[in-house]
Image (cartoon, rainbow, N blue to C red):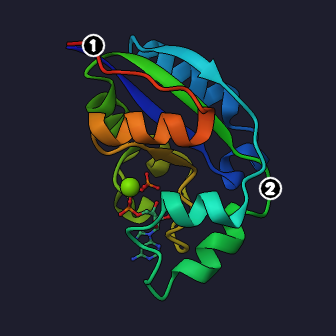
Amino acid sequence: MKQYTYIMVKPDGVEAGLVREIEKRIKNAGLEIVEFDVQKLNGEILDEHYAHVKDRDFYPEMKAFMLSNFVVPMIVYGENAVAKMRELMGPTNSNEAPAGTIRGDYGDKEIINRNVIHGADSPENAIIEIERFFKIKLEQPK
Ligand code: ATP
Ligand code: MG
């Protein structure tokens, strides 16, 4: 089933010059990048996006990091795009991410929030996040 997902290269990925490399990995996985942007986020949109971790003790430091530089939001489309992207990214903690995954290859092994990339965790959340960051209302293909 083809579907959309929402991807965002975080400030550490942008600063390390990884945008092209990440694009290449997405295309090599058979997925298509249908929208691409460069944005400086504000605290409000970030609190909304990270509502599920907003009350955790690590959030203030993570928020400062996410606001520290540009991010690169993308809409990615293709067969099983949500799961395929989560696979390409590897687990949240880069220390546990295998070599060959984006977080395994480039994530900070000590500071968990510097994990290079965000990917939506479900097709439903992908649609919500695409609307949040691109102001586009999409529907997943039926
Ligand atoms: P993301 O949503 O960024 O794609 P994820 O879905 O793998 O990552 P979530 O559980 O949604 O992980 O957590 C969101 C973000 O919060 C993580 O990417 C990471 O930056 C940060 N985070 C999560 N758990 C921790 C933790 N225990 N310590 C520090 N930071 C954390
Ligand atoms: Mg998440």
| Kind of residue at disc 1 | Pro
Residue 69: numbered disc? 2
Q: Which residue is mark 1?
A: 141
The quadrant the N terminus occupies is top left
Visible residue check, residue 100 = no
Tell me: is circle 2 under 8 Å from ligand 1: no
How packed is label 1: few (under 14 Cα within 10 Å), some, or many (20 or more)? Answer: few
**Camera-side residue: 124 or 24?**
124
Q: Residue at x 36, y 47 (%)?
A: 90
The tag earlier along the polypeptide, 2 or 1, is 2
Horizontal and vertical percent position of residue 39: 75, 42
Horizontal and vertical percent position of residue 71: 70, 45
Q: Is residue 9 left or right of residue 85?
A: right
Residue 61 is drawn in which quadrant? Answer: bottom right
Residue shown at 42% from the left, 40% from the top: 128
Q: CB of residue at label 1: within 8 Å of ligand 1?
A: no
